[in-house]
Amino acid sequence: MRADARRNRDRIVEAARAVVAERGIDAPMELIARRAEVGVGTVYRRFPDRNALIAAMAGQYVHEIDDALTRAEAQEPGPWAAVRSFVMWSADQGRGALAAALADLPQELFDAMPEFSRVKSGMVGRLDALVAAAQERGDMRADVGVADVMRLLSLFTCHADLPQERAAHYLLVMLDGMEKRSDGAGKRSDGAGDRLDGAREI
Amino acid sequence: MRADARRNRDRIVEAARAVVAERGIDAPMELIARRAEVGVGTVYRRFPDRNALIAAMAGQYVHEIDDALTRAEAQEPGPWAAVRSFVMWSADQGRGALAAALADLPQELFDAMPEFSRVKSGMVGRLDALVAAAQERGDMRADVGVADVMRLLSLFTCHADLPQERAAHYLLVMLDGMEKRSDGAGKRSDGAGDRLDGAREI
DNA sequence: TCCTAAGTGGACGACCATCTTCCGGTTAGT
DNA sequence: ACTAACCGGAAGATGGTCGTCCACTTAGGA
């Protein structure tokens, strides 16, 4: 493969990520090509069809997330700190928007990417373990689960019209709300804060 | 207008609301017709084109919201209670999803509905006054504004995959977080809760 | 430098989803 | 019983996206 071709391939995957993040999973190929500063023909030379491109992009993305989780596990002092750090990393740079877009992949395409689902479910499992450990240690409220963490993550980051730093603030507030406090400040005036039940359902 | 025609007209508007809420502003006419249990022809007999239907639906919707706000103002004991009540009413029955869908109306259509924008901005103004009053009285944190209220509302209610009662819980937690507490419990461990700045920008 | 395999852009035909029209058959209400 | 109003849904018109094709360009070895 020629050097310029390699370069273009990378730019295309990069562009696909950006465009899918902001226009959803159905973003037209031409938009992706244009963002990569490349003709449509070039895209189709590298990827047999649209699905192949999406698959390549999703594969790269899920690995990136997986690595981030590994880093958080290794570098943070404890499970709760790791969860926090991972969540904030995910909220960065519109990664949440991409996740949300990928969430409505056609089932057919999803099935065609066994590795994607493998890495993804492994990652979710590890995050789940982290949450459980944090709760075990008493660092985190017991009535929220991975499902809540993931949901808030996608909620706060999948809207292009929500300024990024604002999303980060909301997330910090929510994370803060999930933290267990020993001073009793966690008691809410109308008990609403205690009704985050039904967690753990993935 | 014959009685059955009148009945069908209402069902069509109702169907449009439901379908737009769950499929977005670009939902196909046939889906709306089918939901109303009516042929496409019937829809076009009542509304000259797609835009006319959307406009009728949006007009009805904005008035409904306006009325709800009026009710909240009248029936609740104070401004903060009114805000809470209005927010929770809005979160009900997928109204947030509809609001989100209407948020990306084509500008052209938006301009063609002067009444819609009039009622809407009047409503936002009144809500703003309510928030200001609540803050004046010391019932609500001073560092959040209507913008935050509206954003959270749409955030939590515009996702079909977020179970409704879960969205309501999150909202309650957030509303609770906006409430001013005199016992000092509002002080958060890392100060994140104090960084909700930039409010009031509509 | 020259040569050529590899690469490139973008016009274009095929295809599909949706809008809107139209008309033969049905029905509410007098 | 009569008819003006109404109904459903087939079908033409339209617009947008996919993927192909080919004339032109370029990287990189001889």
Image (cartoon, coloured by chain):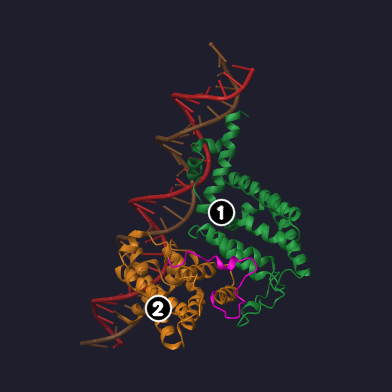
Chain colours: A orange, B green, C red, D brown
Q: Position of residue B89 (x, y in %)?
A: 64, 55
Left or right: residue B96 compared with residue A153: right
Question: Is residue B5 one of those drawn in magenta?
Answer: no
Q: Position of residue A172 (x, y in %)?
A: 57, 77
Q: Position of residue A104 (x, y in %)?
A: 42, 61
Crowding near the residue tagged with mark 2, few <14, some 14–19, many ≥20 C-alpha atoms within 10 Å? few
Left or right: residue B105 compared with residue A1: right
- Look at the picture and state if A152 lies above or below A75: above
Residue B120 appears in which quarter of the rendering? bottom right
Q: Which residue is drawn at 68% across and 49% down?
A: B63
SS label for mark 2:
helix
Q: Where is residue A176 in the image (x, y as percent from the top left)?
A: 57, 77
Residue toward you, A14 or A62: A62
SS label for mark 1:
helix
Magenta span of residues: A178-200
Question: Is residue A182 one of those drawn in magenta?
Answer: yes
Q: Which residue is drawn at 59% across and 54% down?
A: B92
- The three-letter amino acid code for the residue at tag 1 is Gly
**For mark 2, what is the residue?**
A64
Q: Which residue is drawn at 68% across and 71% down?
A: B144
**For mark 1, what is the residue?**
B94
Q: Is residue B98 visible?
A: no
Task: Give the quarter of the figure containing the C terminus of chain B.
Answer: bottom right
